[in-house]
Image (cartoon, rainbow, N blue to C red):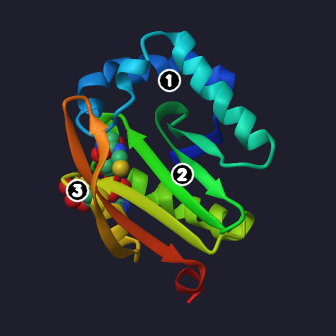
């Protein structure tokens, strides 16, 4: 990773800064993320972090703060890890002012290393809203295969959006 970008497992110490970052990027993030109305206070961010800690501390899906020169600038990780089928589902977001610099590309490369290397996954999936071309470019550039588009898979405040599904297999990653 570029040396100014680091990742830390989400922890309660991140709550205040993560809430402020979320709140100041609310309008930007609402274009593609469905959960902004559920985050109205630091307590809501704290609850989210607590739930990720509970999962990751028992060996489940890890979620990370993305830091730029030590300041939190986004979140990325696994929304879910299915141990039985060895599939991980990656999600990510970045505050607007940090976008366009390849940050999430770098972070997803690290998540692939963690997913295939540490969690021994067979398949990693990224689901993007069909119209979210900036997000779709990430799996496209990282060698994922486009699998399908699922119809009306997410309610985004006032409308349903379709999901474009991308995946990469362990054998492809290691080739
Ligand atoms: C989608 C999103 C995560 C992309 O983040 P990002 O860090 O800008 O994405 P990337 O890492 O792919 O950066 C790519 C851009 O950086 C540029 N870039 C600069 N240096 C680069 C480098 N070293 N490597 C790769 N790209 C680089 C690329 O040219 C590209 O610019 P472009 O989008 O104008 O083509 C971000 O816009 C976001 O959080 N959006 C809102 C929430 C969201 O949509 N989340 C995803 C839900 S599925």
N-term mark: 1 or 2: 2
Query: In the drawing, does residue 50 fall left or right of residue 173?
Result: right
N-term mark: 3 or 1: 1
Is residue 163 at all visible to an observer of this figure?
A: yes
Residue in front for this viewpoint, 149 or 76? 149
Query: In the drawing, does residue 95 fall left or right of residue 58?
Result: left
Using a 10 Å C-alpha cutoff, classify the residue at mark 3 as few (fewer than 14 neighbours), some (14 to 19) or many (20 or more): some
Q: Spatial distance from mark 3 to mark 1, Cα to Cα?
A: 27 Å
* Tag 2 near tag 3, CB within 8 Å: no
Q: Which residue is mark 2?
A: 3
Q: Spatial distance from mark 2 to mark 3, Cα to Cα?
A: 32 Å
Depicted 161 relative to depicted 20: above or below: below
Q: Which residue is mark 3?
A: 130
Outermost residue on the right side: it is 58
Residue 56 in percent (x, y) is at 73, 42
Q: Spatial distance from mark 1 to mark 2, Cα to Cα?
A: 21 Å
- The residue positioned 40% from the left and 77% from the top of the image is 143
* Mark in front: 3 vs 1: 3
Query: In the drawing, does residue 91 fall left or right of residue 152?
Result: right
Residue 118 in percent (x, y) is at 73, 64
């Amino acid at each position: 990773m570029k040396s100014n970008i680091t990742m830390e497992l989400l922890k309660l110490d991140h709550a205040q800064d993560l809430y402020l970052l979320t709140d100041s990027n609310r309008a930007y993030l609402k274009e593609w993320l469905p959960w902004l109305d559920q985050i109205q206070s630091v307590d809501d961010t704290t609850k989210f972090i607590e739930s990720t800690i509970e999962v990751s501390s028992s060996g489940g899906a890890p979620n990370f703060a993305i830091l730029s020169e030590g300041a939190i600038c986004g979140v990325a990780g696994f929304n879910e890890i299915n141990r039985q089928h060895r599939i991980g589902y990656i999600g990510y977001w970045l505050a607007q002012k940090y976008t366009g610099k390849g940050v999430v590309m770098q972070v997803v490369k690290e998540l692939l290393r963690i997913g295939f290397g540490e969690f021994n996954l067979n398949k990693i999936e990224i689901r993007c809203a069909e119209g979210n071309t900036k997000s779709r470019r990430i799996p496209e550039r990282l060698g994922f295969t486009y699998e399908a588009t699922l119809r009306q898979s997410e309610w985004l405040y006032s409308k349903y959006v379709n999901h474009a599904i991308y995946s990469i297999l362990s054998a492809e990653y290691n080739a």
